């Protein structure tokens, strides 16, 4: 008992040297305060079991900075050991629990074939019922005359000669209307014919990187129209690089520049901001070959 009292005293002194109260140690180790008091007093009878005595002492020693293994080794002869009865009882209870848990599974396995056979019989009954219903709905009722047949037999005798003449007249009017529409489609107006002949080549970007050349063929006129959507400078020059557009300046949104260059075989259009200007040649929109903001557009007019 002297060694046991010495163990409790040693642990208590270590606790006090750390400045821990029993409440502090309870918070650190999560061991109930009454068990901590029992360890310091050597009263192990209040412990839940001998295993917890060694575990609690180890936690206590670690918390106050002592070597837990050394403490347990020094006082191992005085500490209670593991009870053989407890181990025996644990070994005895294990098989019984396995046996109890095995019971429901065994009963379920024995009942499984019966359940499967019952479900199979139910499925067969349902299939037979569905087939019988489908067969009954597929058999026609020969005693009753379909409503459509009765309706047709009543309507046909009412088709008089006057109604036949009206139907023929309506059919003739529809045919004449269709023929007139077809003939109108086959006769294009002069503008459509002229545009069908016109061709503008794909643009070729010149070496300076700012000039793109196009060729206009198949047209009798050379008319330029530029629709402005934002501030941009516009100028038009001839092949001798002379300004032929009278009003050369910065145009604003909503303004339209129109110039008849039919007498020319060449025209260079200078656009200060091509993103704000759309060029039309004989009312046909010109597709820019490059996306440069400031660029020169040269149109070579090949007259027929």
Image (tube, grey):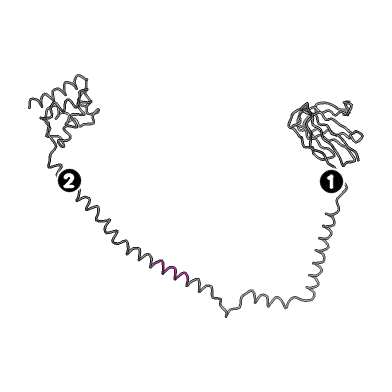
Secondary structure category for the residue under label 1: helix
Within 10 Å of disc 2 (Cα), the crowding (few <14, some 14-19, many 20+) is: few
The residue that label 2 is drawn on is 91
Asked whether 128 falls inside the magenta stretch, the response is: yes
Which region shows up in magenta? 122-131
Image quarter of the C terminus: top right
The answer to whether 76 appears left or right of 304 in the picture is left
Which residue is rendered at x = 87% and y = 33% of the image? 259
Q: Are marks 1 and 2 in contact (CB under 8 Å)?
A: no
For the residue pair 128 and 228, the one nearer the viewer reads as: 128
Q: Position of residue 231 (x, y in %)?
A: 76, 28
The residue that label 1 is drawn on is 196
Q: Position of residue 293 (x, y in %)?
A: 74, 29
Furthest residue in direction top, as rendered: 17
Residue 294: quarter of image? top right
Furthest residue in direction right, as rendered: 263
């Amino acid at each position: 008992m002297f060694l046991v009292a010495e163990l409790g005293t040693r642990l208590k002194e270590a606790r006090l040297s750390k400045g821990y109260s029993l409440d502090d140690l309870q918070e650190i180790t999560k061991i109930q305060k009454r068990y901590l008091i029992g360890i310091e007093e050597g009263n192990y009878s209040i412990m839940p079991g001998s295993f917890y005595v060694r575990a609690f002492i180890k936690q206590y020693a670690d918390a106050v900075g002592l070597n837990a293994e050394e403490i347990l080794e020094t006082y191992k002869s005085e500490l209670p050991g593991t009870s053989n009865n407890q181990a025996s009882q644990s070994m005895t209870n294990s098989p019984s629990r396995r046996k109890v848990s095995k019971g429901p599974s065994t009963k379920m396995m024995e009942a499984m074939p019966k359940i499967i056979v019952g479900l199979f019989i139910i499925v067969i009954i349902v299939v037979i019922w569905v087939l019988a219903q489908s067969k009954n709905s597929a058999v026609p009722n020969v005693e009753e005359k379909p409503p459509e047949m009765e309706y047709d037999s009543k309507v046909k005798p009412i088709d008089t000669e006057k109604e036949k003449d009206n139907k023929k007249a309506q059919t003739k009017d529809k045919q004449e209307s269709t023929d007139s529409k077809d003939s109108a489609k086959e006769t294009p107006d002069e503008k459509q014919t002229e545009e069908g002949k016109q061709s503008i080549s794909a643009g070729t970007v010149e070496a300076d990187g700012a000039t793109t050349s196009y060729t206009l063929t198949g047209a009798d006129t050379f008319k330029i129209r530029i629709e402005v959507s934002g501030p941009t400078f516009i100028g038009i020059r001839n092949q001798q690089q002379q300004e032929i557009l009278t009003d050369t300046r910065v145009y604003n949104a909503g303004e339209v520049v129109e110039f008849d260059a039919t007498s020319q075989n060449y025209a260079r259009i200078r656009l200060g901001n091509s993103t704000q200007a759309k060029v039309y040649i004989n009312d046909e929109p010109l597709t820019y070959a490059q996306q440069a903001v400031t660029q020169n557009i040269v149109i070579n007019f090949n007259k027929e």
